[in-house]
Amino acid sequence: MILGPNNATILVTGDITMDELKKKLGKSFKKWKKGTVPSIEFKKPNVKTKNTLYLIDRPESQQSVIIAGHLTEKYGAVSQIALENMVSILGGSFTSRINMNLREDKHWAYGARGFVLNNQQERPFVMYAPVQTDKTAESVLELKKEIEEFITTRPATMGELNKVKTNQILKLPGQWETNDAVSNSVYNLVKYKLADNYYQEYDKNVRNLTLIELNDLSKKVIKPKNVNWFVVGDKLKIINKLKKLGFDDIIEIDADGELVVPGIEKKIKKNKK
């Protein structure tokens, strides 16, 4: 048995007291017996590739989809509040650098974004951009530039930080308007082992976040040289430009992740020489 009273957490939100809840739960679960809890070990992922482009050919596709990313720190290893604000500046909001570049400035994409998934273990830092086919390679270059400059020559500014902090603070009053919203926050407390007062202190901690803290975290989280790239698009229209971008490998795969032509990466390496 995997789910039992000795490894389960019950979350309840609503108009009910603890005494009432205990009576109802006791009646409903009085026959629920303990089970054997399996031991699960999470090993650090061994990522063998980097600076690799994986290409899925989709003939006659009207646009290309670019997904790029690498694994970064697991939840709790870095400040989640600093991470949230960093992501908002780089790719998490409409006015983020990635979206303003590819959508508002270049007009190559309807929308582009970046995010870090909230996993308990090592989690993906990801950039995502559907772009017009003839600007696929150029869009890859722009995304590369954005993440490299974010931790080198063009780090986050005080103006950017103040804007995303204000956005986070102003949306707090409406964040727990429903039982479901409250339940989700309690779930986060349990899942990520957050302090019971995490959300009571959230406003203060956002306000106290400094630019130095955010930029220091950015250098720890973002690793441009570790990024792997995935492109779905019309191969005949995009491959020649992609070959000129300096990837160590370009590997064509199908929708299941299997090699379409075994050894294609070796052929491309040879051609590059």
Image: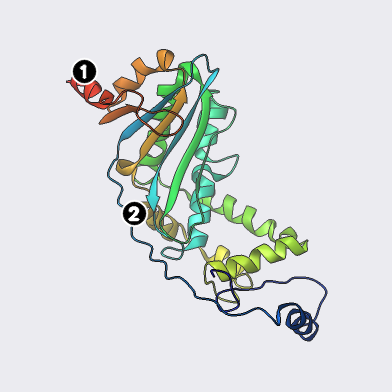
**Helix, strand or loop status at disc 2:** loop
In front: 25, or 184? Answer: 25
- Which circle's residue, 1 or 2, is located before the other in the chain? 2
Reading the image, the residue beneath label 2 is: 45
Identify residue type, mark 2: Pro
Residue positioned 54% across, 48% down in the render: 88
Q: From this view, report whether residue 52 is shown above or below residue 120.
A: above
Badge 2 local density, few (<14 within 10 Å), some, or many (20+)? few
In-image side of 46 versus 273 (left or right): right
Q: How many marks overall?
A: 2
Identify residue type, mark 1: Asn
In-image side of 250 versus 157 (left or right): left
In front: 188, or 131? Answer: 188
Pinpoint residue 75: horizontal percent, then vertical percent. 46, 62
Residue 171: image quadrant is bottom right
What residue occupies the far bottom of the structure in this picture? 19
The Cα atoms of the two marked residues, 1 and 2, are separated by 32 Å
Reading the image, the residue beneath label 1 is: 271
